[in-house]
Image (cartoon, rainbow, N blue to C red):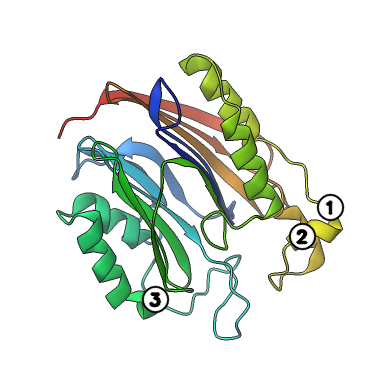
């Protein structure tokens, strides 16, 4: 139950603004964002169980981010379980695009060919230097170009108007100030624990208590919740600021920041 906000070419200072919460079982072992030793151009966290990742960026400008597609069909498990319908981890989809040589269009063709090999997912992927991004949802079999503007994505599809998605889009449209101020505003936006009113909840087949808890931008339950917030800013000179905060069920664990320039 992750939540993403993305703004493309709508800010005089930043061509690319991204923020996201990763929601997961607190016990799932994860590496913080780092430049991978065997792939020094790749900055991403890593799932220690499956060795994939949920989002990442390369020094050459490639970018990808994943959310699970919350399904209610009987042949798919909910994302709160470690037991999946397919053995192939969706985290490999992000990794394979970032370390591969395919363009976004070429990778999209592969995603379509293999759409039945994975549980439901959304993938936003492309190249920041080129300014081209695609979104693919394998459950609905939708491939779309991500237009310039402000977008939100949780566990349905791109810009589905869930309360948390609408809140993120509205907040990102109001960003203002220098790098420090924008970063502070994004972390505050993605720290919002306010749940949606009962009548505004999506109906995805989850128990009511969990459906309501998951309607918050920042989720906090006993065993499952937001374990990380990532903010990425890329200015018009292609300078990247990447900041990650990691959490457990009680509090913030650490903050990691990286700065570098994109170079094709």
- The residue under label 1 is 197
Dots 2 and 3: beta carbons under 8 Å?
A: no
In the rendered image, residue 195, in percent from the top left (x then y), is placed at 78, 48
Query: Local crowd at mark 2 within 10 Å, few (<14), some, or many (≥20)?
Result: some
As rendered, which of 117 and 253 lies closer to the eye? 117
Q: Are marks 1 and 2 in contact (CB under 8 Å)?
A: yes
Query: Could you tell me how many numbered marks the image carries?
Result: 3
Tell me if residue 167 comes above or below residue 122 in the rendering.
Answer: above
| Residue 59 point in image, percent of width and height | 22, 34
Residue at 41% over, 41% down: 148
Q: Residue at x 48, y 71 (%)?
A: 120
Q: CA distance from mark 2 to mark 3?
A: 31 Å
Q: Quadrant of the C terminus?
A: top left
What separation in Å lies between label 1 and label 3 (alpha carbons)? 36 Å
Find residue 208 and report its image quarter. bottom right
Mark in front: 2 vs 3 = 2
SS of the residue under disc 3: loop
Residue 238 placed where, x, y %? Answer: 27, 25
Q: Which residue is mark 3?
A: 87
Is 165 left, or right, of 101 in this rendering?
right
Which mark, by number, is residue 201?
2
Mark yes or no: residue 218 visible: no
Q: Which mark is residue 182?
A: none
Q: Classify the position of the N terminus by image quarter.
A: bottom right
Within-10-Å neighbours for mark 1: few <14, some 14–19, many 20+? few
Question: Which residue lies at the image location 70% right of the left edge and 37% below the top edge?
Answer: 192
Residue 127 in picture, x, y percent from top left: 27, 44
Residue furthest to the bottom: 75
């Amino acid at each position: 139950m992750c939540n993403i906000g993305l703004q493309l070419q709508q800010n005089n200072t930043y061509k690319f603004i991204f923020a996201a919460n990763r929601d997961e079982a607190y016990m799932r072992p994860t590496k913080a964002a780092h430049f991978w030793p065997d792939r020094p151009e790749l900055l991403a966290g890593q799932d220690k169980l499956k060795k994939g990742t949920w989002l990442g960026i390369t020094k050459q400008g490639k970018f990808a981010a994943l959310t699970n597609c919350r399904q209610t069909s009987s042949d798919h498990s909910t994302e709160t379980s470690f037991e999946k319908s397919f053995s192939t981890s969706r985290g490999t989809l992000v990794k394979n695009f970032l370390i591969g040589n395919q363009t976004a269009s070429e990778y999209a063709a592969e995603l379509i060919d293999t759409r039945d090999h994975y549980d439901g997912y959304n993938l936003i992927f492309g190249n920041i230097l080129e300014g081209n991004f695609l979104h693919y949802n394998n459950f609905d079999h939708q491939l779309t170009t991500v237009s310039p503007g402000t977008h939100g994505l949780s566990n349905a599809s791109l810009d589905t108007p869930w309360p948390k998605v609408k809140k993120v889009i509205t907040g990102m449209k109001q960003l203002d100030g220098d790098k420090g101020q924008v970063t502070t505003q994004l972390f505050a936006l993605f720290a919002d624990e306010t749940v949606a009113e009962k009548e505004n909840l999506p109906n995805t087949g989850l128990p009511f208590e969990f459906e309501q808890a998951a309607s918050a931008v920042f989720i906090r339950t006993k065993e499952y919740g937001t374990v990380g917030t990532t903010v990425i800013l890329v200015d018009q000179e292609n300078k990247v600021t990447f900041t990650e905060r990691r959490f457990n069920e009680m509090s913030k664990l650490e903050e990691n920041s990286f700065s570098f320039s994109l170079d094709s």
